[in-house]
Image: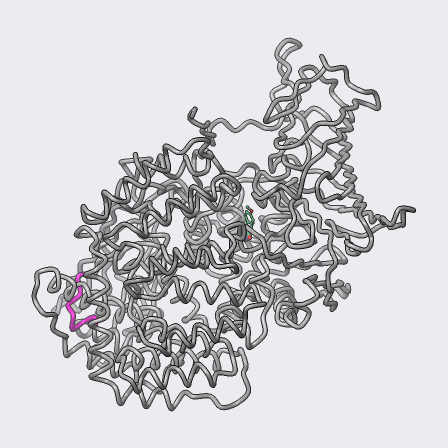
């Protein structure tokens, strides 16, 4: 194959033509949809004009469709006046202002890529971000071309009674042949990636929201009729998000209608199309018996995320795709804050950092490492990453921390005041923050330009005579494929000093007249830097990087005793949790080393004591305790192991199991106590207290189940049978799924029988089996690929079975037989023919092959080479595997 083209940020040029108005008419038919697009275009005054000979042509993007006709200013174009190829339609010498009427034909029924216009179950829907609009009609498909749209949808009335597009419904009518039509108008200029349409026979849940200025917004959630009783929670989530954005950022909704449609076939989580969000049904549909606590909170999170995009993404959009984190990092930060406010702030922080460390840190240390603002891509779809989203949110969080909440809010206000209605860059955002606060964020911009996770080392010195305490930091950012040398960054490090009695010392930096608060943000800017605190009466235990104030790896050089002390006393809940994780990881990796050396592992008694103290702490939030007694997962442990050694998934797995079982045996009575104490007999509710109780109860159950005794198995089975909600059902079933026994098989079968008609619940059924830590899991997953309820066309199914197996069950995926690897490569090959985006996501699971011991490394390499040699490989997969192999 020919090597696909790289697109570079440095090559960005403003568009040669702007589009002011777009009128679209869709005649929707399953196999042959006709799209008539009327564009009002003019030369962009801001683009390089060129002279008569070099005036840029008008190039419209388009692919996978048939061109029926092109009219310019009402007259058919002669064939010599334009060119069409696989990727574009070009008018070499158009006038400075023109209208084009372009008619195309597309085949939604055949579209399995789930971008552009496609069918999901019985409905039509669209997905245009990033570059799907070009599969609908010829258009300058780039986010800096913003236009006002009118859209008319024509379809069979009985099959498609509901016809939706962006903005306001302005007109409708009947046709004589059983078809009807609806016309929509979106008054806000938008890039074409925010265009959407939906047609189907759908149930509609209605509500209203009164905005702070007193306008009533009509809220609508559209779902398939069978799901009508599963959308109430999503509606409440939407109203919470709308109220929160008004209160927190003063941002009000701008249209009279807000619509959400749930579809089963969707490549990502959801999409923020103006006024018409399209959602993966997994983030809309929930009932206590079908969805877990995590599912409910994910609905809050994703509904809020898409709603928040209306300002951060839609009203102010991107100049080019390199700026993706401008909308995504900022919107993730906003949804994180929302969740923190409606649930528990410390627990939310802990779970976000868990995600960051388990997925983003490895990405930043692997072949796909890229800055929060990438500088080049082959396929933009490959850059919807944890780096752009989650690290991007961390970068915003650091600005928030450096400026403080008031100045951050002023910066947001200034950003909207300056840029509403524009397509802008990350510089514009950071510039507004700098100007509103008077802070210099010049060096801070490196966070957007440098890939890799910085390592911050802290050394300390206490002077008992002067009563001073000096912290000396050094920072180093490891090389990544894009750059060997990195400059020092501007890193906010929140610090506290813990007194011997467990309380915090007030902090007074040398040069300050009076002591300040007990947590201070130190701003590192140099490779090496010291900060001295005065009036420190006794040697403290330092608590560094409180609240995980920067996405770095901290090396604080603390003794085990100091870390245990922080695990018991740190007033910062994040650092308290983190101290526990540090202890657990160390203990597990030491046991792994013993196992590899052929020595029997031995448990650390001090750790057991510290664990017990936390487990039984009744003063703390239960959700926090549940996190604090949950050991780091195998993926995170593998990453830690890779920092000093090659990864041995067997040793990691055995060591972690050994620690779990030892804790379970030693603290059995305590786990029983915690389990009983947190049984909730009241009605199911999704408030933070109830969720916390359930999570701690189920954490205790997991340890007790780990004993694998007949009584433990019986208990799990009866918990599974008795559960009145999906959280408890899944908790018991998950624990049982790792134990080879008849009850396991029975429970899995019963679950299937009960839920065989619910596609979303069946995803859980697939995931449970894919995540089971049993030696025959690779074979089971193979078999499940042929199960009638599995469909490789449905991304949720692929993620539930293949994705979960490869990313959440490393011990089985990395089976030294290589069956897991072959299975993944087969699926990549099968997917690439029709859904390259999902194929590339799956291919990315091989990214860390070089970090594994030689047997596995070679097996993975062979599969990567096999994929790379496939005929007609997509650009998406090519980009991933060629980087992995480089
Ligand atoms: N903007 C969406 C994410 C998204 C990206 C691409 C998609 O299709 C390929 C769909 C959704 C968000 O951040 O929620
Ligand atoms: Zn987003």
Residue 111: name its quadrant: top right
* Left/right of residue 827 with respect to residue 200 in the rendered view: left
- Could you say which is closer to the camera, residue 404 or residue 478? 478
Q: Could you tell me which quadrant the C terminus lies in?
A: top left
> In percent of the image, x 59 and y 57: which residue is there?
264
- Could you say which is closer to the camera, residue 16 or residue 149? 149
> In percent of the image, x 76 and y 15: which residue is there?
78
Rendered location of residue 563, percent (x, y): 21, 70
Residue at the top extreme of this rendering: 53
**Is 83 colored magenta in this rendering?**
no
- What colour scheme governs how the chains and residues are painted in the rendered image of this protein? one colour
> In percent of the image, x 38 and y 80: which residue is there?
696
Rendered location of residue 113, percent (x, y): 56, 43
**Which residues are drawn in magenta?**
557-563
Is residue 810 visible to the viewer in this orientation of the structure?
Answer: yes
Q: Could you tell me which quadrant the N terminus lies in?
A: top left
């Amino acid at each position: 194959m020919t090597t696909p083209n790289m697109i570079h940020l440095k090559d960005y040029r403003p568009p040669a033509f702007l589009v002011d108005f777009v009128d679209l008419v869709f005649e929707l038919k399953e196999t042959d949809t006709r799209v008539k697009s009327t564009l009002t275009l003019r030369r962009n005054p801001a683009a390089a004009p060129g002279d008569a000979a070099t005036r840029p042509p008008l190039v419209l993007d388009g692919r996978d469709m048939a061109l029926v006709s092109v009219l310019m200013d009402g007259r058919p174009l002669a064939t010599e006046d334009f060119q069409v190829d696989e990727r574009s339609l070009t008018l070499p010498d158009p006038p400075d202002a023109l209208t084009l009427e372009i008619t195309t034909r597309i085949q939604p029924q055949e579209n399995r890529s789930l971008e552009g216009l496609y069918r999901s179950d019985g409905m039509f829907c669209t997905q245009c971000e990033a570059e799907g609009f070009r599969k609908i009609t010829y258009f300058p498909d780039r986010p800096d071309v913003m236009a006002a749209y009118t859209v008319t949808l024509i379809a069979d009335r009985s099959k498609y009674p509901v016809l939706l597009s962006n903005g306001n419904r302005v007109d409708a009518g009947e046709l004589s042949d059983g078809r009807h039509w609806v016309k929509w108008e979106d008054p806000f200029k938008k890039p074409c990636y925010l265009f959407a349409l939906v047609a189907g026979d759908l149930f509609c849940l209605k509500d209203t929201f009164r905005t702070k200025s007193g306008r009533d917004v009509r809220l609508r959630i559209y779902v398939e009729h069978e799901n009508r009783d599963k959308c109430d929670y999503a509606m409440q989530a939407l109203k919470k998000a709308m109220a929160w954005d008004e209160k927190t950022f003063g941002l009000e909704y701008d249209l009279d209608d807000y619509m959400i449609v749930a579809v089963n076939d969707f490549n990502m989580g959801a999409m923020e199309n103006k006024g018409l969000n399209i959602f993966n049904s997994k983030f809309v549909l929930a009932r206590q018996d079908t969805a877990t606590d995590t599912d409910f909170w994910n609905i809050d999170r994703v509904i809020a995320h898409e709603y928040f995009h209306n300002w951060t993404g839609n009203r102010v959009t991107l100049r080019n795709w390199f700026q993706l984190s401008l909308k995504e990092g900022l919107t993730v930060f906003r949804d994180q804050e929302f969740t923190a406010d409606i649930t528990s702030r410390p627990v939310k922080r802990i779970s976000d950092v868990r995600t960051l460390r388990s997925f983003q840190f490895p990405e930043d240390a692997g072949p796909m490492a890229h800055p929060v603002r990438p500088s080049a891509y082959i396929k933009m779809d490959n850059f919807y990453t944890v780096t752009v989203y989650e690290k991007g949110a961390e970068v915003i969080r650091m600005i928030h921390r450096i400026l403080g909440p008031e100045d951050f809010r002023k910066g947001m206000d200034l950003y909207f005041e300056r840029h509403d209605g524009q397509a802008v860059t990350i510089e514009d955002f950071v510039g507004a923050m700098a100007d509103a606060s008077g802070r210099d964020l010049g060096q801070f911009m490196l966070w957007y330009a440098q890939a890799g996770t910085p390592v911050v080392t802290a050394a300390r010195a206490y002077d008992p005579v002067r009563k001073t305490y000096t912290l000396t930091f050094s920072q180093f950012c490891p090389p990544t494929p894009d750059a060997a040398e990195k400059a020092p960054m501007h890193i906010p490090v929140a610090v506290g000093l813990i007194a011997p009695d467990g309380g915090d010392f007030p902090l007074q930096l040398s040069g300050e007249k009076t002591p300040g608060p007990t947590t201070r943000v130190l701003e590192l800017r140099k490779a090496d830097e010291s900060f001295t605190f005065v009036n420190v009466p006794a040697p403290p235990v330092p608590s560094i990087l409180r609240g995980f104030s920067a996405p770095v790896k901290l090396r604080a050089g603390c003794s085990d005793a100091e870390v245990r002390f922080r695990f018991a006393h740190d007033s910062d809940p994040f650092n308290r949790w983190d101290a526990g994780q540090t202890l657990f990881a160390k203990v597990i990796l030491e046991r792994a080393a013993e196992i590899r050396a052929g020595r029997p592992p031995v448990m650390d008694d001090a750790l057991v004591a510290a664990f017990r103290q936390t487990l039984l702490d009744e003063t703390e939030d239960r959700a926090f305790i549940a996190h604090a007694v949950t050991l780091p997962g195998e993926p995170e442990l593998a990453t830690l192991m890779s920092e000093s050694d090659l990864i041995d998934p067997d040793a990691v797995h055995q060591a972690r199991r050994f620690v779990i079982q030892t804790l379970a045996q030693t603290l059995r009575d305590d786990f029983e106590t915690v389990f009983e104490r947190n049984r909730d007999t009241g009605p199911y509710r999704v408030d933070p207290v109830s969720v916390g109780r359930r999570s701690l109860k189920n954490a205790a159950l997991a340890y007790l189940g780990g004993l694998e005794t007949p009584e433990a198995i019986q208990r799990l089975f009866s918990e599974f049978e008795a559960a009145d909600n999906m959280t408890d059902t899944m908790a018991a079933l998950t624990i049982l799924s790792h134990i080879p026994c008849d009850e396991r098989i029975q429970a899995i079968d019963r679950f299937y029988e009960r839920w065989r008609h619910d596609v979303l619940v069946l995803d859980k059924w697939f995931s449970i089996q894919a995540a089971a830590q049993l030696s025959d899991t690779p074979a089971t997953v193979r078999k499940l690929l042929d199960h009638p309820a599995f469909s490789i066309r449905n991304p949720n199914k692929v993620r539930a079975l293949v994705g979960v197996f490869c990313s959440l069950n490393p011990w089985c995926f990395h089976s030294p037989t290589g069956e897991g690897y072959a299975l993944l490569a087969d699926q990549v090959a099968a997917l690439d023919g029709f859904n390259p985006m999902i194929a590339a996501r799956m291919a990315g699971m091989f990214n860390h092959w070089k970090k594994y011991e030689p047997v596995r490394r070679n097996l993975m390499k062979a599969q990567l080479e096999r994929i790379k040699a496939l005929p007609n490989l997509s650009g998406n997969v090519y980009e991933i595997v060629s980087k992995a192999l480089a």
